[in-house]
Image (cartoon, grey):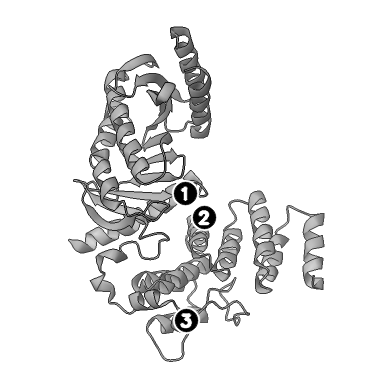
Amino acid sequence: MSDDVKALSAQLASDPQSLVFLRLGELLRQKRQFDAATRVAQHGLERHPHLADAHDLLARIFADAHDYEHAFDEWDMTLRIAPQHTGALKGLAFLYFKIGDLAQAESHLQAARDAAPDDPTIEQAFAVIRGEAGATLAPPSPRATPAPQPAVSLPAADAEPPAVAARRSESVSALPDERIFAGLEGAEEGLLLLDAAGLVLGGALKTPEGTDVTDTVAAYLAGVSQESGRAARLLDLGSWHGLSAEGQGGHVYLVQPTPESLLLLMRDRSLPLGRLGLLAQRAAQVARQWLERQR
Amino acid sequence: MTAPALARALDLITRVRGVRGAMVVSRSDGLVVAEQLMEGIKGSAVAALASSLAGRLQRAMISAGLGSSQFWHLQCDQGALLVVPAGAEHGLLLVAVTEADVNVGLVRLELLRAAETAV
């Protein structure tokens, strides 16, 4: 263990409530000790659950460890706490860029530029998105400063998986159906968007054994929106906005992106139901935007 | 399953703060078997819808390879409907109607406990 890590660890041990965990976690991240960095960040979050910088730290650790779904969650949480957090805005821009959603990437970068107009790394990132020669995009640094990235750079665009790179090259305005949920983990096996009649608009579902059950599940779910709405009205509960179910082998979460559609998200039991709800709401937002573009 | 046992089960659930009522519903036909509801809640209609929704979800989840449903939760702006299967061969549903700011985790636990011990 290096001296600086030891020193910060000792400092944190002597005052567990202090914010020194942010520096320690960042240092461990830079040293690519992701497990230790994650533990430090998560312990810090237990004591400071509403600290945006702590969520941002955890997101960067996840991003460096290529755990993009959790990174997305943490940056999303960061923005809920601090909507103008430039680190989180740049982080989400990076993730959107990774999966080829250039419009979202640019939108988040623009928001970051509005929040921090003097941050030169944002202009560099814009250059990447616009495809300017020689530019590469790395995950954001902890602060909006022009500090060079340490040895934590994620694969740049040219190192992306072929499928991702192929998607990125497509025109944003001509998104094919299968890209409704681009960027959301499990889009082709655990996400389903249906119309009011139970017809599939996008996504797919597979059993844990890999069998495609998209159409069967869609048929069973036809009418769920109406029945949920009727139950809510009968009970004077207002509108329904989520229906979750725990199964022996996994969870499902249903939301209504629009009054005429239904979105189902399915995951195994390792993902807590509350987190599944957050993912479902995000997927619903993506689906809503996609549906609007189809009109 | 006796009437006192059902009453005990519903007591356990309605004791939780924010619960407006609870019912035991026959899963197969959606009829109310027992209920403890605040005035104004249309028990029989809700029971029918809960049974129907449970059936749809059950079939969808089994088709998706997730096994049978153990708990489901309809979240609404001003409250929620929470349901747990109960009884032999899960022939019954325990249903709770709650306000919006209820502790869902606690109601879930009480529903599961009631389903295991009292029904």
Upstream in the sequence, badge 2 or badge 1? 2
Upstream in the sequence, badge 1 or badge 3? 3
Q: Nearer the viewer, residue A63 or B102?
A: A63
Label 1, secondary structure: give it. Answer: loop
The amino acid type of the residue labelled 1 equals Asp
Chain for numbered disc 3:
A
The amino acid type of the residue labelled 3 equals Ala
Labels 2 and 1 within one chain: yes
- Mark 2 or mark 1, whichever is nearer to me: 1
Q: Where is residue A8 shown, x and y percent of the image?
A: 78, 65
Q: Where is residue B4 shown, x and y percent of the image?
A: 47, 8
- Mark 1 or mark 3, whichever is nearer to me: 1
Q: What residue would you read off at disc 1?
A: A268
Marks 2 and 1 close (CB-CB < 8 Å) = no
Q: Nearer the viewer, residue A70 or B77?
A: A70
Q: Which mark is residue A81?
A: 2
Query: Is the residue B21 above or below the residue A287 in the image?
Result: above
Chain for numbered disc 1:
A
- Give residue B54's quadrant in the image: top left
Q: CA distance from mark 2 to mark 1?
A: 28 Å
Marks 1 and 3 close (CB-CB < 8 Å) = no
Q: Where is residue A27 shown, x and y percent of the image?
A: 70, 70
Labels 1 and 3 within one chain: yes
Q: Badge 1, how many Cα within 10 Å: few under 14, some, many 20+?
A: some
Query: Is the residue B81 above or below the residue A127 in the image?
Result: above
Q: What residue would you read off at disc 3?
A: A159
